[in-house]
């Protein structure tokens, strides 16, 4: 009779070997192994989370951004709408409506500091665009000065900021400005356009 057969015969005669707690030794060993594996997993879990957050997530984000172009339409909504009507294969530059829309979008994007992020994204497609957007953002205010100068030449009314405030500001904002009156210890009230003015201003 082989040793294994002897062991099985002994177990059949005396029953399985028991641990100190009275449970079968084999079951206790399996339970102890499961605990060790679980403990080992808990020990390496922080490292796995660190690797996921530090390496995997940024790589996944970069891969997603490499194929996702929503930033263009989000930053230049009017321009992309107008460009949809332009035939890129015609050999002609876009119509004036596109440049008009681009001025509006760039002005708003510059105020929100979003033009540089868009430039960085487009720079992957065309080298030099990032620098172009930065320079355009710095000079976009100069474009508006062309119209400002013409209005001021027509009438001195347009040179006075208080006239603009009275014409554009809401009653509550004008009242708050009157109470503030340049007090350096208090925050200047945030501009609020009149209802009829706000409805026609670009978003």
Image: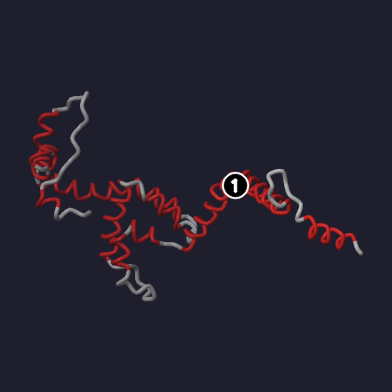
- Judge by depth and name the residue closer to the eye, 135 or 6: 6
Q: Is residue 128 left or right of residue 193?
A: right
Q: Residue furthest front?
A: 13
127, above or below 39, in the image:
below
The quadrant the N terminus occupies is bottom right
Q: Residue furthest bottom?
A: 90
Residue with the mark numbered 1: 45
What kind of element bears circle 1?
helix
Q: Is residue 189 left or right of residue 32?
A: left
Crowding at dot 1, Cα within 10 Å, few <14 / some 14-19 / many 20+, comes out as few
- Judge by depth and name the residue closer to the eye, 27 or 16: 16
Quarter of the image for residue 159 reads top left
- What x and y, as percent, mark residue 195? 10, 50
Colour convention of the picture: secondary structure
166, above or below 11, in the image:
above
- What x and y, as percent, mark residue 154? 10, 47
Residue at horizontal 29%, vertical 64%?
A: 98
The quadrant the C terminus occupies is bottom left
Quarter of the image for residue 77 reads bottom left
Q: Is residue 105 left or right of residue 134?
A: left
Total marks shown come to 1
- What x and y, as percent, mark residue 137? 35, 48
- What x and y, as percent, mark residue 44? 63, 46
Q: Residue furthest right?
A: 1
Q: Residue furthest top?
A: 185
- Judge by depth and name the residue closer to the eye, 45 or 15: 15
Residue at horizontal 10%, vertical 43%?
A: 170
Quarter of the image for residue 191 reads top left
């Amino acid at each position: 009779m082989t040793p294994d057969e002897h062991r099985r015969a002994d177990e059949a005669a005396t029953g399985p070997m028991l641990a100190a707690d009275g449970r079968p030794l084999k079951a206790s060993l399996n339970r102890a192994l499961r605990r060790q594996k679980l403990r080992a997993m808990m020990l390496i879990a922080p490292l796995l989370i660190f690797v996921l957050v530090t390496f995997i997530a940024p790589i996944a984000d970069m891969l997603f951004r490499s194929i996702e172009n929503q930033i263009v339409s989000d930053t230049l909504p009017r321009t992309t709408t107008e460009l949809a009507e332009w035939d890129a294969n015609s050999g002609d530059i876009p119509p004036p409506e596109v440049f008009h829309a681009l001025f509006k979008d760039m002005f708003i994007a510059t105020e929100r500091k979003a033009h540089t992020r868009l430039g960085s994204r487009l720079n992957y497609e065309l080298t030099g665009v990032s620098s172009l957007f930065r320079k355009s953002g710095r000079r976009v205010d100069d474009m508006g000065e062309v119209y400002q100068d013409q209005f001021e030449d027509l009438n001195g009314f347009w040179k006075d900021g208080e006239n603009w405030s009275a014409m554009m500001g809401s009653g509550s904002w004008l009242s708050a400005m009157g109470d503030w009156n340049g007090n350096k210890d208090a925050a200047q009230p945030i501009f609020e356009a009149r209802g009829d003015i706000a409805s026609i201003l670009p978003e």
